[in-house]
């Protein structure tokens, strides 16, 4: 079946540094990818929708300049957390919509970010 | 390697019926298990989270059970309503914190 991978799976960084998280669709093309974050014991919150070759659409309350999203190819989207702070520590999940089937969305395993 | 399976892949029932969605996993060494709801074009909503030490969780008309030894979880929906129509996903969280997702069950409640 379709697989979405994320790298890294777990990252610890110092406050003020930037962290890049990759999301890849391994055996299908994804015109659209989504980025979520989840705080402990809370729902997944959609951060942004990423479309290949165009600017991402951010949800209300999500800082565009802080969470940079790039979707340069049909199989790769990246989320860069810039100037990370401890409150950015969270679990980040991406999902990818199969271009051949717009109703099907596959989810990645997530990336745990801890900012010291 | 942990694998998560959801059966059935799709389900259509008349309004008012009680129904059960199934989720099975191959490795019982889980941290917790979550049930999510996904509406078309929207994000995920967490419905219930069951810690590995718990047997069940309830929220309104929803009840989720967990049997680690047999590698199974069920989501019970009572008195179904058309608004319950959505795709339901279960996800197992490993001790390494990563989520392993089921493929989902697409539920349609007919008025």
Image: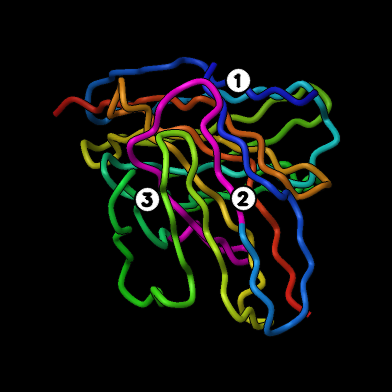
- B61 or A13, nearer to the observer: A13
Residue occupying image coordinates x 70% and y 35%:
B66
Question: Closer to the camera: disc 1 or disc 2?
Answer: 1
- What segment is highlighted magenta in the picture? A21-45
Q: Is residue A63 above or below residue A26?
A: below
Q: What SS does tag 2 mark?
A: strand
Give a yes or no on whether discs 3 and 1 share a subunit. yes
Q: Is residue B98 above or below residue B17?
A: below
- Do the residues bearing badges 1 and 2 touch, measured as CB atoms within 8 Å? no
Question: Closer to the camera: disc 3 or disc 1?
Answer: 3
Say if the magenta span includes residue B88: no
Q: Position of residue A11 (x, y in %)?
A: 76, 61
In this figure, which residue is indicated by the disc labeled 3? B43
C-alpha span from label 3 to label 1: 21 Å
| Left or right for B15, reference A23 | left
Q: Magenta span: helix, strand or loop, mainly?
A: strand
Q: Earlier in the sequence, mark 1 or mark 2?
A: 1
Residue occupying image coordinates x 72% and y 83%:
A15
Q: Is residue B106 above or below residue B82?
A: above
Q: Position of residue A109 (x, y in %)?
A: 64, 41
- B17 or A31, nearer to the observer: A31
In this figure, which residue is indicated by the disc labeled 2? B49
Residue occupying image coordinates x 57% and y 70%:
A81
Q: Residues within 10 Å of mark 1 (few under 14, many from 20)?
A: many
Q: Is residue A60 above or below residue A102?
A: below
């Amino acid at each position: 079946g379709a697989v979405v991978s994320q790298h890294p799976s777990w990252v610890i960084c110092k406050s003020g540094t930037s962290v890049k998280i990759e999301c890849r669709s391994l055996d299908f093309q994804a015109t659209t990818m989504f980025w979520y974050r989840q705080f402990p014991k809370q729902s997944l919150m959609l951060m942004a929708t990423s479309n290949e070759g165009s600017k991402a659409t951010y949800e209300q309350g999500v800082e565009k300049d802080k969470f940079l999203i790039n979707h340069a190819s049909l199989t790769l989207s990246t989320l860069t957390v810039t100037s990370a702070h401890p409150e950015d520590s969270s679990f980040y999940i991406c999902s990818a919509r199969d271009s051949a089937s717009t109703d099907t969305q596959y989810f990645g395993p997530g990336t745990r970010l801890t900012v010291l | 390697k942990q694998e998560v399976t959801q059966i059935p892949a799709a389900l259509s029932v008349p309004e008012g019926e009680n129904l059960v969605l199934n989720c099975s996993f191959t490795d019982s060494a889980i941290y917790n298990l979550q049930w999510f709801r996904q509406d078309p074009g929207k994000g995920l909503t967490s419905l219930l989270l069951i810690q590995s030490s718990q047997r069940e969780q309830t929220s309104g008309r929803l009840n989720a059970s967990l049997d680690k030894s047999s590698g199974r979880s069920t989501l019970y929906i009572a008195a179904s309503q058309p608004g319950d129509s959505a795709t339901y996903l279960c996800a197992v969280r490993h001790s390494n914190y990563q989520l392993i997702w089921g493929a989902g069950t697409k539920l349609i409640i007919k008025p």
